[in-house]
Image (tube, rainbow, N blue to C red):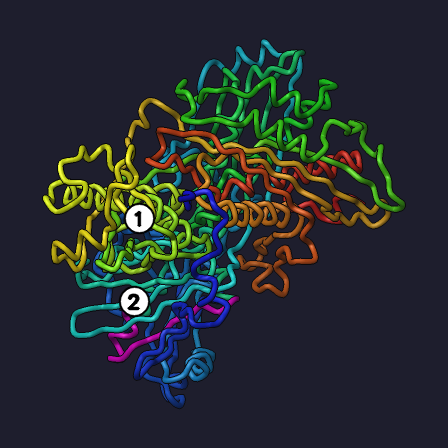
Amino acid sequence: MTPAVGQPMDRVDGRPKVTGSARFSAEIPLPGMAYAALVGAHIASGRITSIDAREAEAAEGVLAVLTHENTPPIVAQPPLIPSLAGTAAPGQTFFPLQDDVVHYAGQHIAVVVADTHERAQHAASLLHVRYAEEPSVTTLDQGRDLARVPEAIFGGFMPGRMSRGDLRKGMDEADVRLDVTFTYAANNHNPIEPPATTASWEGGELTLWDATQGVTSTQQTVAALLGLPVSRVRVVGHYTGGSFGGKAMIWHHPALAAIAARAVGRPVKLALTREQMFTSMGHREEQEQTITLAAAGDGRLTALRHHKLSPTSHFDEWAEPSLGVASQIYGCPHYEGEYRMFRANTMTPTFMRAPGEASGMFAMECAMDELAERLGMDPLELRLRNITAIDPMTGDPWSSWGLEECYRRGAERFGWAGRDPRPRSRREGHWLIGTGMASAGYPVAQPVTPQRARARLYADGTVLVQAATPDFGTGVATAMTQVAADALGLPVERCRFENGDTALPQIAAAVGSAGAGMISAAVHTAAAALRDALVARAVADAESPLHGADPKSVELRDGRMVLRDDPGTGETYAEMMHRQFLPDLEALGSWTPDPGANGHALMTFGAQFAEVAVDADLGLVRVRRMVGAFAPGRVLNPKTARSQLMGGMIWGLGQALLEANRMEARTGRWAASSLGDYLVAVNADAPDVEVELVEVEDTVVNPLGVKGVGEIGQVGAGAAIANAVHHATGRRVRKMPITVEDLL
């Protein structure tokens, strides 16, 4: 029987999605449904002096208008903790409609509920709000002099300053020193599905259908905010239409939907508009990064200094951890990293695909390319001279590596060896052709709470595996079906994975590329426990052909338990269960990672290569092809893994050349507020993309050695493109995105 894990199996949720039978959170039909519309503040800083809701309340179909004047107070505000922790995970430690203070433009100041979506939206436009406006701070230039180094960032999970070795000593030992500054426009979340929640009360029991990366996170956050026992809140999220971090934390709308539903006494559906997504679900913050690289004449790094400046909200110390992977991927002995941030009139920034790794490695890998040029060295050779098999921050060996193999296989597939290093050396008509490369790395995040799954085998030989995790486009249901099938020796068509409901065994939010590893560990553990129970029953059964056998000598093959050395001796699950009058048998599996990782450091590695064409007269950049080689441990399903990696690489293209938003200093509002003026990559922008999977054995991260691929595909992609643009044009652009104006 061919193992299911490692096969490019088609998605089990493909048919319901393409036929429309899959129901997303905004498509749940409930009797007596009402609809909520959010109203956002028009100013960035100040107070609400009055809200006249009379016209809105009198509008046809309106059931309620909630403002700070009549919204019940929240009971408790949970702290800002990343949702991977498995606890309450609010996107920011501020909840709206509690007082008259306005902290940022677009802040929710009212909820209008009506009997149709259109009537709710119309009535929302009838509110008359007056403000006492105050000066706001929103841009880097406004906040630069207010910046300070916090004790910790990222919900307190990372220090504000870190170092190793002696930076001054490393600088003094260098033959070459490079000081460069990179700037980044803010990025906004725009998955296909806007965030949406449907809320329904039945007595004191609340059910939420929520678009989220973690139904447990929504459950625990809303329970804390409303002062409910967690057992009285059920959250369902079978399908989520994309997230990429925007639905990793729990924003205000699930609790507001619940508050509105309680106020009107009927189910309420609350879906954000596309414009509200720019002010309601966090963003990747505007930032500035300064890097100093010092190296010996042979290219070996002697010192690295990496500082970052960015705005955070008035309530939380949040910054992308941009210095993390950049400080670890090379064996530089002397290092200093520092985050500087200032309070701004913005909502708390949040996770956005490769949060920090994509921006930090853009700076690091563009700087490495400049250093290679100064040293007269091939960019790939410079990286090879500096890679390290240990984490330079801790001295621990990597649990698995593969970076050197990624360089080799990626370069071979891309054709790097034939590259002429001279800028502007290759031309095709009006097009200047350039190639570039970059390293990629992404930390292997681990949950801190036990991850659980249930496996139940029925007497007909089919199995149901359950876990609370939603599927937000990664193909988790498909991969977990494969994991269960292998653990129980069953064909995949006899296995089914049920997910997306807090009534099922608990799984933390699948964020930080941790989903495949932690969910597969729970599913494998549950299925293995069920397998052991089945074998134990068989060898103890006097009527079984396996009676008296050593359980370790029994194998599972195509739904049969057989002796390893005598495959003809054995029986099917169904035969044993019918004989023992068992309609079903189930087992619960629980997996908790080793907090010390058995003395190892955890990272996924890769290498990115890109070819661009730049119009010499117009400055237009077209990415013609991209190659990525990645070492994500064991690959559960190469088809879905390649899809994830390819998506990350294309987003890296968008980040490098298209995606940008800026605050208008005068108004404190985003310049772009819809997909009409916020540019994202589309099919016409997509080049040929090749993905090379380098499987490496990892016995540390989890039972199956899975490290995840959701985000590493974006890391380094933008830097490879920027380095290719320099190779094509001879011009260094130290910003994202790179625009036509930068190249004219």
For the residues marked 1 and 2, what is the alpha-carbon distance in whole angstroms?
17 Å
How far from the left and from the top, in percent, is residue 663? 57, 54
Q: What residue is disc 2 on?
A: 208
Q: Are marks 1 and 2 in contact (CB under 8 Å)?
A: no
Q: Which numbered circle lies on residue 466? A: none
Judging from the image, what secondary structure is the residue with disc 1 in?
loop
Residue type, numbered disc 1: Ala
Residue 565 lies in quadrant: top left
Judging from the image, what secondary structure is the residue with disc 2 in?
strand
How far from the left and from the top, in percent, is residue 471? 40, 56
Q: Is residue 545 left or right of residue 283?
A: left
Residue type, numbered disc 2: Leu
Q: Nearer the viewer, residue 168 or 677?
A: 677
How far from the left and from the top, in percent, is residue 14? 47, 62
Point 40% across, 29% down: residue: 698
Point 36% across, 67% down: residue: 197
Q: Is residue 88 left or right of residue 186?
A: left
> Would residue 82 be visible to someone looking at this image?
no
Residue 82 lies in quadrant: top left
Q: What residue is disc 1 on?
A: 508
Residue most extreme to the right: 429
Q: Is 623 placed above or below 131 here?
A: above
Residues in magenta?
Answer: 258-274
Q: Is residue 473 left or right of residue 414?
A: left
Quadrant of the image for the N terminus?
top left
> Would residue 55 be visible to someone looking at this image?
yes
Point 25% across, 41% down: residue: 569
Sequence order check: which comes first, mark 1 or mark 2? 2
Quadrant of the image for the C terminus?
top right
Answer whether residue 736 is magenta in the image.
no
